[in-house]
Image: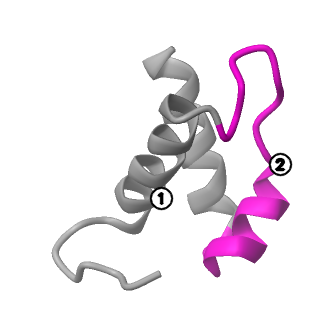
Amino acid sequence: MKWEPDVPRWRQVFAVMSERIMDGTYPPEGRLPSAMDICDEFGISQVTAKRVLTELRKAG
């Protein structure tokens, strides 16, 4: 993934994950990847991955 320097990484990963939810990659009744899986896929820290998951939960 190419990072946008002016956008926090958690927001960029949040956008990707949100798109995957919308396109059915992650079905509504299914589970999202774990924080560790997100870390591995995007090369981000656990703190950042947990922030993404928290924000996704808040967004519904």
Q: Residue at x 65, y 48 (%)?
A: 50
Circle 1 SS class = helix
Q: Which residue does the numbered mark 2 point to in the structure image?
A: 34
Q: Position of residue 30 (x, y in %)?
A: 82, 24
* Residue closer to the observer: 1 or 34: 1
Residue found at the far left of this picture: 6
How packed is label 2: few (under 14 Cα within 10 Å), some, or many (20 or more)?
few
Please provide the residue range marked out in magenta: 25-45
Compared with residue 42, is residue 32 higher up or lower down, i.e. above or below? above
| Left-right relation of 53 to 3 | right
Q: Position of residue 52 (x, y in %)?
A: 54, 46
Q: Position of residue 16 (x, y in %)?
A: 46, 54
Is label 1 in contact with label 2 (beta carbons under 8 Å)? no
| Left-right relation of 19 to 34 | left
| Sequence-first disc among 1 and 2 | 1
Q: Amino acid at mark 2?
A: Ser
Q: Amino acid at mark 1?
A: Val
**Magenta includes 35?**
yes
Compared with residue 41, is residue 13 higher up or lower down, i.e. above or below? above
| Left-right relation of 58 to 2 | right
